[in-house]
Amino acid sequence: MVDFDYLQPKTLEEASSLLIKAKGKAIPYSGGTDALSLLKEDIISPEEVVNLKNIPNLTAIEYENGKGLKIGGLVTITDIAENPLIAEKYAVLSEAANVIASPQLRNVGTLGGNLNQRPRCWYFRKDFDCIRKGGSICYAVDGENKYHCIVGGGPCYIVHPSDMAVALLALDASVKIFSGKKSRTVPISEFFVLPDVNYLKENILEPGEIVTEVIVPELPNNTKSGYYKFMERDVWDFAVVSVAAVLTKNGNSLKSGKIAYGGVAPAPWLDTNINSRIKGLSLDDDSIEKAVAQVLKDAVPLEQNEYKIPLARNLTRKMIKKLTA
């Protein structure tokens, strides 16, 4: 680990200014659950680390009836997991938060940090000059690729590790970003970028931009939501495949909804093959089976990860039946 200056700004304006002046040689720091690993593994070597934890007004969870939910960027994963209002109205968020890492990491990890974490690909994390670190090769293409993406890949085949991002994508959330002296808000579907757009980054953030808040709209009546995450270990593990669903029922069919996937793509993934069939989907077994059979039908798996397709389909079937029972 290289030496760096540890800076402790008191305001968003000061923090953003420090990050802008550093011209890419500084990183923001909140919970540190990923940043410390990146530093210790020499994946990043910043000259400055800008602590965000002294900045006020970034740790609130606010709900307004009819308008929706706002969650500050420094809210911990534990705060989300244990919030009774979120569990009642946005079960998908609560369920996703409860299966992130271990209790100790949830206690310090933040929502903003979870959305901005870097890939867990072993070629990226270890001593390989892979394409995401500025090299010329994605070693996963011909190497060990059991956990890599099956859609949206090329020239890099990572999967995005954030559980919260998948849940928020299903909820049509938006991300509020501060830079300089002003804020902008973008749909979370536009926050992440695929490798064919930029294979060095996972999202749209530029130096000096800080995630300050996530905004979740009010859900329609008769809406239920949920999150399934398939892992190889019970704790401190990332999704092999995850499914987040927000479904609104109307009698014996679906009125509307959205299903998002994790563990299958370099960004949280909306599969159009299933989402285009949700509106008006009859909830009899035959109709559900026909819809589920379309999940990830355009996938192009690598040598070792074709199993993710039936896994995603099985989780989708289980989720639809759970939320519409």
Image: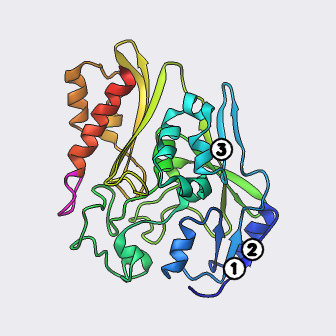
The residue that label 2 is drawn on is: 18
Q: Secondary structure at mark 3?
A: strand
- At 70% from the left and 72% from the top, the residue drawn is 50
**N-terminal of the two: label 3 or label 1?**
1
Q: CA distance from mark 1 to mark 2?
A: 6 Å
**N-terminal of the two: label 2 or label 3?**
2
Any mark on residue 71, and which? 3
Any mark on residue 22, and which? 1
Q: Is residue 153 magenta?
A: no
Label 1 CA crowd tier, 10 Å (few <14, some 14–19, many 20+):
some
- Place of residue 287 in the rendered image (x, y in percent of width and height, measured from the top left): 23, 23
User: What is the span of residues highlighted in magenta in the rendered image?
Assistant: 297-307
Q: Residue furthest bottom?
A: 2
- Do tag 1 and tag 2 residues touch (Cβ < 8 Å)? yes
Q: Residue furthest right?
A: 10
- At 25% from the left and 62% from the top, the residue drawn is 146
- Do tag 3 and tag 1 residues touch (Cβ < 8 Å)? no
Q: Which sits in the foreground, 142 or 275?
A: 142
Q: CA distance from mark 2 to mark 3?
A: 24 Å
- Tell me if 23 is positioned left or right of 195 in this view: right
- Name the kind of residue labelled 3 in the image: Ile
Q: CA distance from mark 3 to mark 1?
A: 28 Å
- Do tag 2 and tag 3 residues touch (Cβ < 8 Å)? no
**Toward which corner of the image does residue 290 lie, by quadrant?**
top left
- Place of residue 91 in the rendered image (x, y in percent of width and height, measured from the top left): 51, 33
- Place of residue 225 in the rendered image (x, y in percent of width and height, measured from the top left): 46, 31
